[in-house]
Image (cartoon, rainbow, N blue to C red):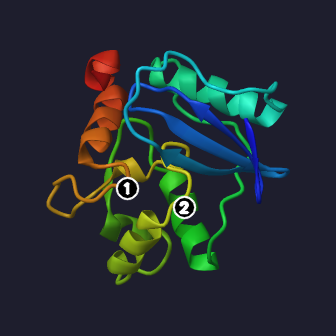
Amino acid sequence: MVDGKNGQYCLCASPVGILGIECVERGISAVHFLGENTVSEMEYTDPLPPLLQQAVRELGEYFSGRRRSFTLPLAPEGTPFQHRVWEALREIPYGSTCSYGEIAAAIGNPKASRAVGMANNRNPLPVLIPCHRVIGADGRLVGYGGGLDIKKKLLALERGNGREGLR
């Protein structure tokens, strides 16, 4: 665990590489994809605060196929529009996908698919706010901050390919 300028931070191993998890007092504020590594468990030097312990536990359950939704308090920073988009992303069912246009329609602004794409791109909580579930209007996998390979793996996990999709 590291104390950052905005809160606390820990590293957590996952099947898609090391994740950096940040929290502030009111919730998890960011998840970062930090790349591949062979670390088999989270790295920290001090006992983790309960919120980061919960984040590591829930992410572990998700990656093992035992969790379909998260109960963590989230504290992403963004504009009101981004928050509306991120809330809509949280409504996409586990194992499902939808298009940017469908998200735009869901938030009451059907012509805002490009703006939805930008809000998706600015999502500070990938996996927890499932931006990997958003696809192009033609069904293609497009754009993902962690890379399309990670997006494919997350969707494979959720579509019942279990851990096979994470290899």
- Left-right relation of 141 to 8: left
Residue 100 percent location from the top left of the image: 33, 66
Residue 67 showing in the rendered view: no
Residue found at the far front of this picture: 45
Label ID, residue 30: none
**The one of 34 and 84 positioned closer to us in this rendering:** 34
Alpha carbon separation for disc pair 2 and 1: 15 Å
For the image shown, how many numbered marks are present on the structure? 2
Quarter of the figure that contains the C terminus: top left
User: Mark 1 is on which residue type?
Assistant: Gly
Whichever of labels 2 and 1 marks the residue nearer the N terminus, that label is 2
- Left-right relation of 8 to 69: right
**The one of 89 and 76 positioned closer to us in this rendering:** 76
Q: Residues within 10 Å of mark 1 (few under 14, many from 20)?
A: some
Q: Is 139 rendered above or below residue 79?
A: above
**The one of 19 and 26 positioned closer to us in this rendering:** 19
Residue 56 percent location from the top left of the image: 64, 28
Residue 37 percent location from the top left of the image: 40, 27
Q: Residue at x 56, y 47 (%)?
A: 31
Q: What residue does disc 1 label?
A: 145
Quarter of the figure that contains the N terminus: top right
Q: Is 153 rendered above or below residue 67?
A: below
Q: Secondary structure at mark 2?
A: helix
Residue 134 showing in the rendered view: yes
Q: What residue does disc 2 label?
A: 86
- Left-right relation of 87 to 100: right
User: Mark 2 is on which residue type?
Assistant: Trp
Q: Secondary structure at mark 1?
A: loop
Residue 94 percent location from the top left of the image: 43, 37
